[in-house]
Amino acid sequence: MEHFINFRDDRASLLKQYYQPDFKDLFYKIKDIKAPVKSELLMVLLDGQWHSETELIRIARKQQKYMGRVTLGTMMHMLNQNLKSNYVEKKFMNGEMYYKISDNYVGLSRAACSRYRFSLK
């Protein structure tokens, strides 16, 4: 006799396992970032790849003239503090700091930025 999986029960168990209720709050926090420098850096990090500190500083200097390593490090720390403790990952490689959005939050960040950011302009 064949065993059929009840789709409704299977979906409910998947939701319990993977749904995080705080994702809604995180989504709104990402969506509400208004600082142009943070917004621009967030748009660069949306690809989910590692980006060097030098690259991010060059991008940020287009918005804010006085941007350096300390300011960038502080901004990334504040993103982690305001959004989620593991939102931005960092690693030291080849004598330079690299940053990226954690794999768990890339999709959520893309949805928050692409869907609502462009409707505000």
Image: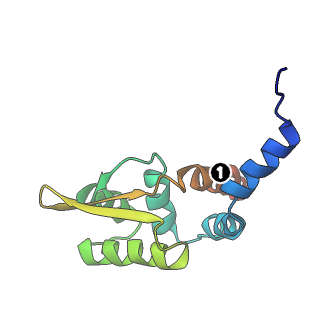
Q: Residue furthest top?
A: 1
Q: What kind of residue is marked 1?
A: Ala
Can you say whether 8 is above or below 3 in the image? below
Q: Nearer the viewer, residue 73 or 105?
A: 105
Does residue 67 appear to the left or right of 28 in the view shown? left
Q: Position of residue 64 (x, y in %)?
A: 38, 70
Q: Position of residue 60 (x, y in %)?
A: 37, 63
**Dot 1, how many residues are within 10 Å of its Cα: few (below 14), some (14-19), or many (20+)?**
some
What secondary structure is found at the residue carrying circle 1?
helix
Colouring chosen for the image of the structure: rainbow
Q: Quadrant of the N terminus?
A: top right
Does residue 53 appear to the left or right of 24 in the view shown? left
Q: Nearer the viewer, residue 31 or 36?
A: 31
Q: Nearer the viewer, residue 119 or 22?
A: 22
Quarter occupied by residue 88 = bottom left
The number of discs equals 1
Q: Quadrant of the C terminus?
A: bottom right
Q: Position of residue 50 (x, y in %)?
A: 33, 51
Can you say whether 72 is above or below 49 in the image? below
Residue picked out by circle 1: 111
Q: Residue at x 32, y 63 (%)?
A: 90
Q: Residue at x 64, y 68 (%)?
A: 26
Q: Residue furthest left?
A: 95
Q: Nearer the viewer, residue 92 or 58?
A: 92
Q: Residue furthest front?
A: 1
Q: Residue at x 79, y 44 (%)?
A: 11
Quarter occupied by residue 77 = bottom left
Q: Residue at x 48, y 65 (%)?
A: 87
